[in-house]
Image (cartoon, grey):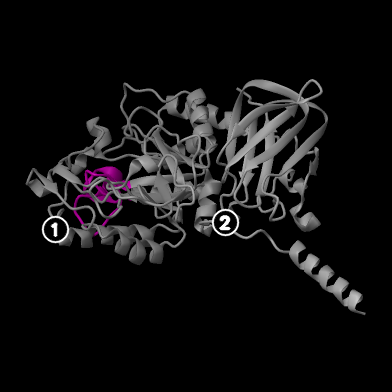
C-alpha cells in the first residue's frame, strides 16, 4: 500500500510539473508593450510651418498663414507607409515651434488660424482617421518645449501643456504611443519676447505626475516613449540601430551631476545596449528620418531600400523597433521618391520573410519540459507567437536539431523568445550540417522579441542546429526560422 501511495504521489507531482510553465525571469513586458513589439516598424510624421520655411527647427515666430499645403492627402501618406511595411503612424501634433495641428483651445497658435481647410481643418483628425481606415495604429507627439508660447518657463505653461495632452488623449481614439523627447528650452519667440529661456528639466515638466495622471489614466494602452521610457526608450542615437547586444530591460540612470533620470537628462550611453537584468522592461526604439532631416527639404533624397533593410536588421532584428521619419512636402504628400523607396523596402521585407524554409521540418530536442507536448520543440516552427519550446529548469543550455526533407538555401536566421516570461538567453549559436559534419555558421548574444542575422554568404544544408550556450535559467523560445534574402 505504501509503495502504491508513494508511486501515486510521484505521478501526481510529475503531472503537476509537466503542466507548470517556466517561472518568469526578470522584468516583464506589459500587454501594451507586447503589442508594441508586434508593431515592429512605424513612422513619425513631421509637418508644420517649419516645412514651408525649409528649416529643421522652427523658431516659433512663423505666421500661421505659412501653413498652407496645396493638396494635403492623409490617405496618400498612410498608404505609402503601409506599402513600406509600417504598422503605425506617430503624428507630431506640435513640434518645438509650438504650432498645434488641431483646433486646440489652449493657444491661438494653431491650425484654425491658417488657410488650411479655410480655418476649419483638423490635421490630427485626418491623419488619425486615415491611419485607422488603412489598418495602421495611431500615436501622437506633443513637444513639451514651446518656442511660441509666452508662458513657457512659468508654472502656467505646464497647465497649458497638460491640457494639450488631455485634448489629444481624449479626442482622437485609442493611441498606441505617446511620444516625448528631451528638448528643454533655449532661444525662442515666446510671444514676442525673443529671448532664451532655461528650465530645470528634472522638475519643471513633472513627468511622473504628467504620465501617471494623464497618459496612464486617459490612454492606458499608449506606450510612453522618451529617453528613459516609461515603456519604450530612445536608442541613444538617430541612426536607426541599437548595439548587436541589446537588452529590453533598462535601469534608467541620470546624467553626470544629476540626481534623477528624466527626458533630456539621462545617461544615453546606456540606451543602445540596455541593462542586463535591468529593473524595468523598456525596449529601444530606433528613430531615423527617411531622408537626411526630419522635415522635407527638396535637395534631399530618401535612404535607399537596401539601407532601410539594413536598418531593419539592426533595429527590429535586435529586439527593438524601427521608427522612420516621414516628411510630407509643401503639397502635404510624400514625394514620389519616398513612396518608391518605402514600397521597395516593404516588398523586400515581406518577400524575404514570407516563407520559413524549415516550417515543415522535423525537430529533435535534447529536452522538453516535463516531457509535455505543450512545450514541444515543434512549437519553434508553427508560426504561432503564443506557443514555445521550453526545457526543464536544470536544462539551461539545450540544443535542437531541425531536419528538412531536402537541402534548402538560406542566408537569414530568425530567433524569438517567448518574452512574456522575460528575456532569458544570453548567448546562442547556429550550426549547419555541411560535408558530413556540423559547422557553426552564426553565434549571437541577446535575443528577446526577435533576433535576425544576415549571413555573409548563403548556406545550403538539410539540417540546422540551434544551441543555447549561455542562459541563467531554462529557455522559452517561440520561433526559429531560416530565410533567403530576396534582394
Distance CA(mark 2)–CA(mark 1):
44 Å
Image position of 486 with respect to 420: above or below = above
**Could you say which disc has been placed on residue 154 in the image?**
1
Residue 58 position, x and y percent, is 21, 38
> Could you classify mark 2 by the number of other residues whose Cα lies within 10 Å: few (under 14), some (14-19), or many (20 or more)?
some
* Mark 1 residue element: loop
Q: Foreground residue, 253 or 406? A: 253
Q: Residue at x 17, y 41 (%)?
A: 63
Image position of 66 with respect to 216: above or below = above
Part of the protein shown in magenta:
93-122
360 lies left or right of 215: right
368 lies left or right of 175: right
Q: In the picture, which quadrant includes the C terminus?
A: top right
Residue contact at pointers 2 and 1, CB within 8 angstroms: no
Residue identified by numbered label 2? 25
> Could you classify mark 1 by the number of other residues whose Cα lies within 10 Å: few (under 14), some (14-19), or many (20 or more)?
few
Residue 167 position, x and y percent, is 32, 60
Q: Residue at x 21, y 57 (%)?
A: 204
Q: Foreground residue, 296 or 317? A: 317
Q: Can residue 467 be seen in the rendering of this structure?
A: yes
Magenta-drawn stretch, dominant element (helix, strand or loop) = loop
Amino acid at each position: 500500500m505504501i509503495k502504491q501511495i508513494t508511486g501515486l504521489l510521484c505521478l501526481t507531482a510529475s503531472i503537476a510539473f509537466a503542466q507548470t510553465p517556466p517561472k518568469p525571469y526578470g522584468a516583464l513586458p506589459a500587454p501594451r508593450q507586447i503589442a508594441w513589439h508586434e508593431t515592429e516598424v512605424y513612422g513619425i510624421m513631421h509637418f508644420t510651418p517649419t516645412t514651408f520655411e525649409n528649416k529643421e527647427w522652427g523658431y516659433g515666430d512663423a505666421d500661421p498663414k505659412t501653413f498652407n499645403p496645396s493638396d494635403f492627402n492623409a490617405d496618400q501618406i498612410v498608404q505609402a507607409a503601409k506599402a513600406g511595411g509600417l504598422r503605425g503612424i506617430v503624428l507630431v501634433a506640435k513640434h518645438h515651434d509650438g504650432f498645434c495641428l488641431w483646433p486646440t483651445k489652449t493657444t491661438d497658435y494653431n491650425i484654425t488660424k491658417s488657410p488650411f481647410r479655410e480655418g476649419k481643418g483638423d490635421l490630427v483628425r485626418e491623419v488619425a482617421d486615415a491611419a485607422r481606415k488603412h489598418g495602421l495604429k495611431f500615436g501622437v507627439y506633443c513637444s513639451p518645449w514651446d518656442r511660441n508660447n509666452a508662458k513657457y518657463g512659468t508654472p502656467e505653461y505646464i497647465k497649458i501643456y497638460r491640457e494639450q495632452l488631455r485634448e489629444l488623449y481624449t479626442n482622437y481614439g485609442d493611441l498606441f504611443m505617446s511620444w516625448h523627447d528631451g528638448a528643454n528650452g533655449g532661444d525662442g519667440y515666446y510671444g514676442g519676447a525673443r529671448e532664451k529661456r532655461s528650465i530645470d528639466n528634472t522638475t519643471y515638466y513633472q513627468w511622473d505626475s504628467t504620465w501617471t495622471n494623464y497618459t496612464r489614466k486617459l490612454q492606458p494602452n499608449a506606450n510612453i516613449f522618451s529617453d528613459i521610457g516609461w515603456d519604450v526608450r530612445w536608442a541613444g542615437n538617430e541612426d536607426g540601430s541599437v548595439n548587436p547586444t541589446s537588452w529590453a530591460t533598462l535601469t534608467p540612470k541620470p546624467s553626470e551631476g544629476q540626481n534623477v533620470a528624466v527626458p533630456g537628462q539621462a545617461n544615453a550611453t546606456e540606451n543602445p545596449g540596455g541593462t542586463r537584468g535591468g529593473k524595468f522592461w523598456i525596449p529601444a526604439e530606433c528613430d531615423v528620418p527617411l531622408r537626411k532631416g526630419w522635415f522635407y527639404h527638396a535637395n534631399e533624397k530618401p535612404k535607399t531600400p537596401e539601407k532601410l533593410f539594413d536598418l531593419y536588421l539592426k533595429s527590429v532584428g535586435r529586439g527593438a523597433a524601427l521608427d522612420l521619419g516621414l516628411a510630407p512636402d509643401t503639397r502635404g504628400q510624400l514625394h514620389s521618391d519616398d513612396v518608391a523607396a518605402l514600397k521597395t523596402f516593404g516588398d523586400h521585407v515581406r518577400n524575404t520573410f514570407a516563407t520559413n524554409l524549415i516550417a515543415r521540418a522535423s525537430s529533435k530536442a535534447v529536452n522538453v519540459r516535463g516531457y509535455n507536448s505543450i512545450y514541444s520543440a515543434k512549437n519553434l516552427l508553427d508560426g504561432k507567437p503564443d506557443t514555445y519550446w521550453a526545457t526543464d529548469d536544470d536544462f539551461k543550455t539545450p540544443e535542437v536539431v531541425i531536419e528538412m526533407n531536402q537541402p534548402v538555401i538560406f542566408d537569414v536566421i530568425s530567433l524569438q523568445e517567448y518574452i512574456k516570461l522575460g528575456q532569458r538567453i544570453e548567448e546562442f549559436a547556429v550550426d549547419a550540417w555541411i560535408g558530413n559534419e556540423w559547422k557553426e555558421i552564426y553565434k549571437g548574444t541577446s535575443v528577446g522579441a526577435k533576433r535576425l542575422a544576415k549571413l555573409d554568404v548563403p548556406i545550403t544544408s538539410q539540417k540546422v542546429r540551434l544551441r543555447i550556450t549561455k542562459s541563467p535559467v531554462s529557455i522559452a523560445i517561440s520561433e526559429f526560422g531560416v530565410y533567403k534574402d530576396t534582394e
